[in-house]
Amino acid sequence: MNLTLYTVKALILLDVSNGSRVLAKYYNTGAPSNAATSPAVATGPAPTSTEFATLKDQKTFERRLWEKTRKLLNNEIILFNNHVVVYKGMADVMLFVVGSLEENELMLSSVLNTLYEAINLVLLKYQTEKRTIIENMDLVALAIDECIDNGIVIETDPGTIASRVSKRPSELADISFNDPNSISGAMNKVRDSFFAGILLK
């Protein structure tokens, strides 16, 4: 039984066509931990592991994961290399959430669906594909960070994540450029008083 809050080991976005990395975040990597798995671990420092410690290890894992799942596009959960992996396709990229072998599949699936919907909400006016994800990498990375912090799931509502990351189009429409309290309103007021001063002379 997994009694720790550290749910996610990795979040990976791969290109469907060739398996290249679009975005990857690995959590709890570093020096090996000698702490026993117990309820105290949940409140202590993050457990660390050396399995994804180097870029080479990460790329090897990603390549093998892509080779395993590229033929299984209809599935959404697999056991792979002593990990539970849930995944979903988005146009020309695949989104993977990786957890430990003891992790609850429903929790990982919830994280996957949350991130999938949050990314779609953040990129609302665009089609969610590799090109738009790369062009809006800052927003996508912020959405991921709003959902997962060092492997701990902190938010599972895609609407909340999207609202924290970016303004919704309805909120952008409410901005008035003639409002005297806005920067442009202040600039308009300065311009009007400047020209009024020139015309009076």
Image (cartoon, rainbow, N blue to C red):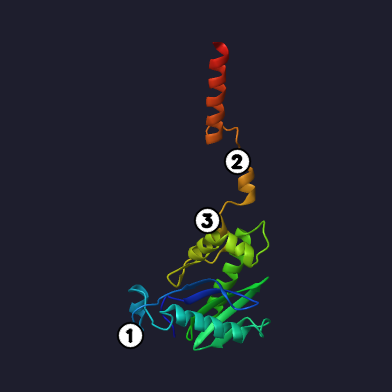
SS state under label 3: helix
| Front residue (pair 81, 4) | 81
What amino acid is found at the position of numbered circle 3 in the picture?
A: Arg
Q: Position of residue 70 (x, y in %)?
A: 64, 83
Dot 3 corresponds to which residue? Answer: 164
Which residue sits furthest top? 201
Query: Looking at the picture, does residue 1 appear above or below residue 178?
Result: below
Answer yes or no: is residue 180 visible.
no
Dot 2 corresponds to which residue? Answer: 175
Query: Looking at the picture, does residue 97 appear above or below residue 174?
Result: below
What amino acid is found at the position of numbered circle 2 in the picture?
A: Ile
Q: Residue drawn at (56%, 78%), measured in percent from left and top?
A: 106
Q: Is residue 201 left or right of residue 5?
A: right
Dot 1 corresponds to which residue? Answer: 36
Alpha carbon separation for disc pair 2 and 3: 18 Å
Q: Position of residue 17 (x, y in %)?
A: 65, 77
Q: Residue drawn at (56%, 34%), measured in percent from left and top?
A: 184
Are discs 1 and 2 less than 8 Å apart at CB?
A: no
Q: Residue drawn at (59%, 82%), measured in percent from left and top?
A: 66
Q: Is residue 72 left or right of residue 157?
A: right
SS state under label 1: loop
Q: Position of residue 173 (x, y in %)?
A: 64, 44
